[in-house]
Amino acid sequence: MTSRAEAADMPPGETKTPDRLRRRASRLLSQVATQSDRLINEGLGQVDARKWHYAVLASLQEYGPGSQATLSQRTGIYRSDMVGVLNELAERALVERAPDPDDRRRNVITITTQGRRHLRRLDEVLDDLHDELLAPLTPAERDQLVRLLIRLLDHHAQQAPHSPIS
Amino acid sequence: MTSRAEAADMPPGETKTPDRLRRRASRLLSQVATQSDRLINEGLGQVDARKWHYAVLASLQEYGPGSQATLSQRTGIYRSDMVGVLNELAERALVERAPDPDDRRRNVITITTQGRRHLRRLDEVLDDLHDELLAPLTPAERDQLVRLLIRLLDHHAQQAPHSPIS
DNA sequence: CTACATCGTTAGCCGGACTAACGCAACAGG
DNA sequence: CCTGTTGCGTTAGTCCGGCTAACGATGTAG
């Protein structure tokens, strides 16, 4: 319908553009995302971290302390999974989980000094990993890619379940 | 809670961009891929299909019949999962699975006429879905995105496990 | 006081990527 | 001809990430 004219009525056996498989954005996205995830997970694994650790720590550093629900929205991590992530972070003393005196249902999560140090380390590691991930692209292209993805995300993040901020 | 405490322990002169969470390509990729997957799955679900069906059918149409192992490489679907996909396709008579006389270990998979018709339908559906997925982008930008992703994929697909063609 | 919403937490589902192992067939070399 | 190796299809199952459901404790509104 909304594709390049070519497919209207083709004899059976003829194709439109020869590599539709390769060009379908959905396929590309999921495949590249898979590669990316593998890379990031392996890399972060070597410094005893997971990508969620980064998300939470960065969110804390940039937007300040918050309840688990808040962090959940900021990072896009489900609050059911947030529990485990915060456990891991608390174990490592990168984060402090204290009951909120003003609302005893909540925990206030604060990043510790160690946490900040660790975050800096993770930022370095991630910079390197992204260098590897985006190796074939020039800086301008990397920027372009990021911009495009952000626009897609912003467009779809609205009516998404749980609709995360980032 | 939304206190932009940044200067907290930032070494003077060295300022991180404030929304690193939002700009990390790895995060963007996985988030957009998730949205994309949701969209595609829902859309295809409404015509009793999965994205794997499309991958296999398109591969058959474009590169001709092949063994399951061949299809596996062409589509990136693991051969252990290919079994199930082909079962589904064969149930629907979109594909024929016949033993290869030349090598009795193999099955030769052929697309049927029904399969070709179904593929055309799927292509339409996918065109629409991609229109929705890429809605915020101009045609030029969509193309740019696809190009960038292809380059990333090609770069990483080499040393990947199972290293699929597409 | 009652009804309802929110928070943290636990448990569990589901789909997708991936591995292990099997039986079978093909093939290469002695 | 036998023998070890490799490729094939299949089964089973692991692991992980996104997501739902439900609970007890707490807060809030009528």
Image (cartoon, coloured by chain):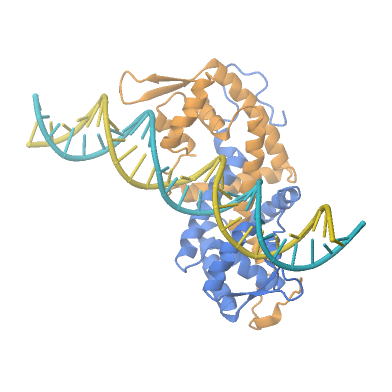
Chain colours: A blue, B orange, C yellow, D cyan
- In the image: residue A132, left or right of residue C5: left
Q: Give the percent coordinates (x, y) of residue B136.
A: 75, 46
Residue at the spot x=46%, y=35% of the render?
B74
Residue A103 can be seen, yes or no: yes
In the depicted structure, whether residue B117 falls above or below residue C22: above
- In the image: residue A126, left or right of residue A105: left
Q: Quadrant of the N terminus of chain A?
A: top right
Q: Quadrant of residue A74?
A: bottom right
Residue at the spot x=54%, y=33% of the render?
B52
- In the image: residue B119, left or right of residue D25: left
In the depicted structure, whether residue A152 falls above or below residue A86: above
For the image, the number of numbered tags is 0
In the depicted structure, whether residue B93 falls above or below residue B141: above
Residue at the spot x=42%, y=26% of the render?
B66
Residue placed most toward the observer, B49 or A95: A95
Q: Give the percent coordinates (x, y) of residue B54.
A: 56, 30
Q: Quadrant of the C terminus of chain A?
A: bottom right
Q: Give the percent coordinates (x, y) of residue B151.
A: 54, 48
Q: Give the percent coordinates (x, y) of residue A102.
A: 77, 74
Residue B159 can be seen, yes or no: no
Residue at the spot x=46%, y=64% of the render?
A45
Residue placed most toward the observer, A96 or C26: A96
